[in-house]
């Protein structure tokens, strides 16, 4: 791609703080920049950027802040609409790729002719996690049809979105596994899980299962923070396993902690696409997961490269986790297979799908 041929891409997200969508946007922006595209990132919140972004990528942030006052909320939304429209006109992108509050973005860009692609990164049934406003499905369906395409992370999400939105262009593109750093640590008798301490992550199920299957010398490490921390700590105390279960809080060295562990256990009740599970498979670790909507079934083939257990089946989870604890050869087999599975999710492979499905396709039309 020559300098004259370079196309402008604007990526929109809430912010670039800690989170799966933030990591995804950062990696995609850097990848596209390396491929020769001119990339701008338009953020909806004025907050610190916690990911490394290539120096030739411009980041736009609003110069006003969100407040909880009802009047100021309304004023903030109007300011945000003005900011989005004004910034997009300044950037004048060839393609807009949005991962934040799709209905709001589509409303804010009415009258602008930029082709907009929407990336839906949560379970499509969890509307509150996708939209910032409670917009009826009929209105969302009307708005979504303004987009050139919708990106779903899993085949399950794709099927739901097709039925919900009646859109003719829904594309399945999973998350990419970030650049891996390999650590040569001796394995501990440690089961690890990673995620926000919220009810939907189901850590209470994991703690109860561990209490049932505990073997001397083994430990459960839960990495993450959130509003359920006190409740989970009370459960650990009630089950009298405080010596063997640690709520470690948020950590920046998750790769090291995964590498030191022997098993990754995932009891989330709902997902879009579980980055934590993908990172564990890429470490690699033998993984066991609830078969929640959606994501785990796209990565784990039960009995081949890990264990997939029916949702909330604690008895089945306990049996499979016990097998992994007792059988080192089984763990090593799953590790080898998990590594093979994770290779198809590397940034180059997933980036190539984005190029082929969206960016090259759109820029060819503009040429």
Image (cartoon, helix red, strand yellow):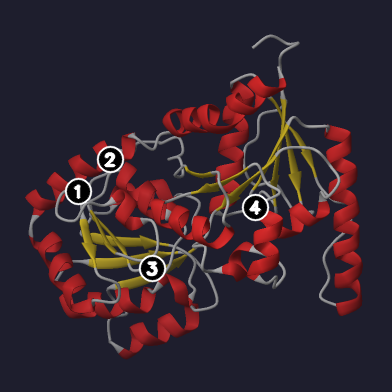
Choose the circle earlier in sequence order: 4 or 2: 4
> Residue at 39% across / 38% down in the picture?
345
Task: Decide which of tag 1 and tag 4 comes sooner along the chain.
Answer: 4
Query: Would you name the residue on which mark 3 appears?
Result: 268
Alpha-carbon distance for marks 3 and 4? 22 Å
Q: Where does residue 277 sit, x and y in percent of width and height?
A: 36, 54
Instruction: Evaluate if marks 1 and 2 touch, with contact meaning CB atoms under 8 Å apart.
Output: yes
Q: Earlier in the sequence, mark 1 or mark 3?
A: 3
- Could you tell which of marks 3 and 4 lies nearer the N-terminus? 4
Mark 3 vs mark 2: which is more N-terminal? 3
Q: Position of residue 245 (x, y in %)?
A: 32, 73
In the rendered view, tell whether residue 43 sits above or below residue 199: above
**Residue 101 sits above or below residue 268 on the image:** above
**Secondary element at tag 3:** loop
Q: Is residue 214 visible?
A: no
The circle drawn on residue 341 is: 2
What's the CA distance linking mark 1 and mark 4? 32 Å
Visible residue check, residue 192:
yes
Circle 4 sits on which residue?
17
Q: Which mark is residue 305?
A: 1
Seen in the picture, residue 286 relative to 216 is either above or below; the reply is above
Q: Residue at x 86, y 78 (%)?
A: 69
Q: Real-space Cα distance between discs 1 and 2?
A: 8 Å
Label 2 sits on a secondary structure element that is helix
Mark 1, other Cα within 10 Å: few <14 / some 14–19 / many ≥20: many
- Spatial separation of the CA atoms under disc 4 and disc 2: 28 Å
**CA–CA distance in space, label 1 to label 3:** 19 Å
Q: On the picture, is 1 further left or further right than 211?
A: right
């Amino acid at each position: 791609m020559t300098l004259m041929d370079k196309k402008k891409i604007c990526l929109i997200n809430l912010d670039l703080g800690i989170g799966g969508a933030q990591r995804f946007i950062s990696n995609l922006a850097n990848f596209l920049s390396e491929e020769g595209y001119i990339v701008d990132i338009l953020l909806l919140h004025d907050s610190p950027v916690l990911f490394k972004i290539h120096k030739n990528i411009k980041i736009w942030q609003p110069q006003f802040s969100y407040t909880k006052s009802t009047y100021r909320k309304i004023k903030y939304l109007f300011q945000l609409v003005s900011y989005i429209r004004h910034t997009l006109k300044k950037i004048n992108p060839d393609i807009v790729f949005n991962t934040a509050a799709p209905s709001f973005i589509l409303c804010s860009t009415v009258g602008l002719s930029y082709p907009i692609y929407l990336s839906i990164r949560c379970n499509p049934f969890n509307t509150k996690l996708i939209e910032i406003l409670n917009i009826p499905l009929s209105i969302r369906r009307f708005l979504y049809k303004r987009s050139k395409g919708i990106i779903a992370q899993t085949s399950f999400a794709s099927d739901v979105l097709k039925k919900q939105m009646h859109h003719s262009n829904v594309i399945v593109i999973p998350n990419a596994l970030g650049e891996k750093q390999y650590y040569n640590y001796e394995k501990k008798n440690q089961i690890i899980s990673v995620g926000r301490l919220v009810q939907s992550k189901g850590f209470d199920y994991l703690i109860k299962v561990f209490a049932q299957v505990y073997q001397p010398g083994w430990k459960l490490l839960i990495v993450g923070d959130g509003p359920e921390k006190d409740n989970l700590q009370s459960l650990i105390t009630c089950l009298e396993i405080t010596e063997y279960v640690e709520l470690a809080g948020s950590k920046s060295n998750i790769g090291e902690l995964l590498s030191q562990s022997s098993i990754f256990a995932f009891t989330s009740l709902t997902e879009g696409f579980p980055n934590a599970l993908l990172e564990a498979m890429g470490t690699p670790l033998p993984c066991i997961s609830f078969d929640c909507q959606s994501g785990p079934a796209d990565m784990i083939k039960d009995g081949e490269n890990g264990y997939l257990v029916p949702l909330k089946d604690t008895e089945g989870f306990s049996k499979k986790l016990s097998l992994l604890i007792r059988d080192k050869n089984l763990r090593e087999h799953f590790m080898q297979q998990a590594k093979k599975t994770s290779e198809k999710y590397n940034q180059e492979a997933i980036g190539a799908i984005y190029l082929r499905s969206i960016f090259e396709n759109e820029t060819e039309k503009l040429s």
